[in-house]
Image (tube, rainbow, N blue to C red):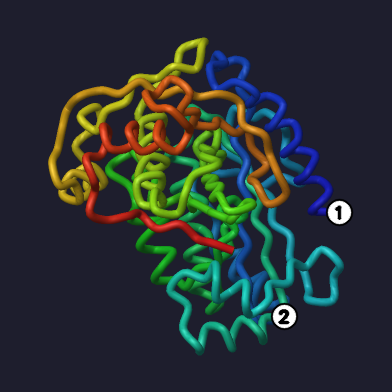
């Protein structure tokens, strides 16, 4: 029942996010799911939940589609429950963050999952997301558990969660590459990459399709850059055109790291064309903005991609990783 209830809310969120140029009154509440996997008794879990609560949140029986105040629900599932999300060892190896052999063995013994569903207005994004992330960390720390991010679909050790989800901020500004995952897969000889996790901030995920493997580094950097610029207030116009430049980023650790990875830094702008992306199985339950290179110079798609990315990054030396299936 907990899964069905959350899917209904996600459908409502997806339909209302068909354009992120909505006014504040039109926007739905932001909704996230976090799961803490534990090998603890019901009594131990209840004791921890009695002692620990997310600051600024109120506990409710059911999440509303829209709320003016941060609210959350908690459900405890047992391994025998149909709704218990079972993750294979291969999944843990691929999407695990900071997991040791001990963590993997401990997860295999986990017999319960504490499901935390939260909703908060987009005007309280930083407060809401920080609070829920801290709550999940404190609960997992209390019960010696592992934390699953329902948006990126990664599972974290305590230290990895702390480094990315708790420390991946500069004030109220999230450093997006610490909070999202770029997932790439081979589609008939061409790569297709999509971000997971932008819904936590109330924005679409970014999609780039039909590119060659040798462009992976620059495509990954582009997706992180566009995501960060959107978080910082960048917007395409009604035609989907968005001028972008590294120079437009705020002075954060992310910008400094990106600039240091470039062979040569330029403050020039390039014009990015965005359009509605088409979801496929495995994509996030979120609106997709696809990067189109149709306005770039070149005789074919690959040449357009290469020229566009070269103009923007001037042959960067490093790549913000993608996960590949």
Instruction: Kindly tell me whether residue 304 is visible in this rendering.
Output: yes
Rendering coords of residue 157 (x, y %): 47, 73
User: Quick one: quadrant of the C terminus?
Assistant: bottom right
Q: Is residue 40 left or right of residue 122?
A: right
Residue plotted at (52% across, 29% down) = 122
User: Quick one: quadrant of the N terminus?
Assistant: bottom right
Rendering coords of residue 312 (x, y %): 27, 33
Q: Residue furthest top?
A: 238
Numbered disc 2: secondary structure: loop
Residue plotted at (59% across, 15% down) = 25
Q: Residue furthest front?
A: 299
Residue plotted at (39% across, 63% down) = 162
Q: Is residue 78 above or below residue 64?
A: below
Closer to the camera in the image, 281 or 10: 281
Q: Is residue 116 above or below residue 105?
A: above
Q: Residues within 10 Å of mark 1 (few under 14, many from 20)?
A: few
Mark number displayed over residue 111: 2
Q: Is residue 319 above or below residue 114?
A: above
Q: Residues within 10 Å of mark 2 (few under 14, many from 20)?
A: some
Numbered disc 1: secondary structure: loop
Q: Is residue 62 left or right of residue 213?
A: right
Q: Residue furthest left?
A: 264
Residue under label 1: 1
**Reading the chain from its start, which is encountered first: label 2 or label 1?**
1
Rendering coords of residue 258 (x, y %): 23, 46
Q: Is residue 160 left or right of residue 268?
A: right
């Amino acid at each position: 029942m907990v899964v069905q209830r959350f899917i209904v809310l996600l459908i409502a969120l997806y339909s209302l996010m068909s354009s992120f140029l909505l006014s504040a009154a039109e926007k739905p509440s932001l909704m996230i799911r976090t799961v803490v996997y534990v090998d603890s008794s019901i009594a131990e879990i209840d004791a921890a939940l009695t002692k620990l609560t997310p600051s600024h949140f109120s506990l409710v029986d059911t999440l509303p589609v829209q709320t003016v105040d941060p609210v959350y629900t908690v459900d405890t599932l047992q391994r025998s429950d149909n709704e218990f999300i079972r993750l294979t060892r291969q999944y843990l190896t691929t999407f695990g963050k900071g997991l040791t052999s001990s963590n993997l063995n401990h997860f295999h013994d986990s017999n319960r999952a504490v499901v935390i569903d939260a909703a908060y207005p987009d005007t309280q994004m930083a407060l809401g997301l920080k609070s829920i992330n801290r709550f999940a960390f404190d609960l997992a720390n209390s019960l010696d558990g592992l934390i699953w991010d329902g948006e990126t679909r990664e599972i974290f050790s305590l230290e990895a969660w702390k480094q990315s989800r708790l420390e991946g901020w500069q004030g109220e500004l999230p450093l997006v590459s610490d909070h999202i995952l770029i997932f790439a897969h081979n589609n008939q000889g061409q790569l297709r990459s999509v971000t997971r996790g932008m819904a936590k901030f109330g924005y679409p995920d970014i999609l780039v399709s039909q590119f060659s493997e040798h462009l992976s580094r620059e495509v990954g950097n582009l997706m992180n850059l566009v995501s960060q610029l959107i978080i910082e207030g960048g917007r395409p116009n009604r035609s989907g055109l968005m001028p972008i430049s590294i120079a437009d980023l705020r002075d954060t650790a992310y910008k400094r790291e990106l600039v240091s990875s470039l062979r040569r830094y330029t403050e020039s702008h390039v014009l990015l064309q965005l359009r509605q992306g088409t979801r496929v199985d495995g994509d996030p339950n979120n609106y997709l903005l696809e990067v189109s290179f149709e306005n770039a110079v070149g005789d074919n798609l690959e040449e357009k991609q290469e020229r566009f990315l070269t103009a923007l990054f001037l042959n960067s030396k490093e790549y913000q990783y993608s996960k590949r299936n």
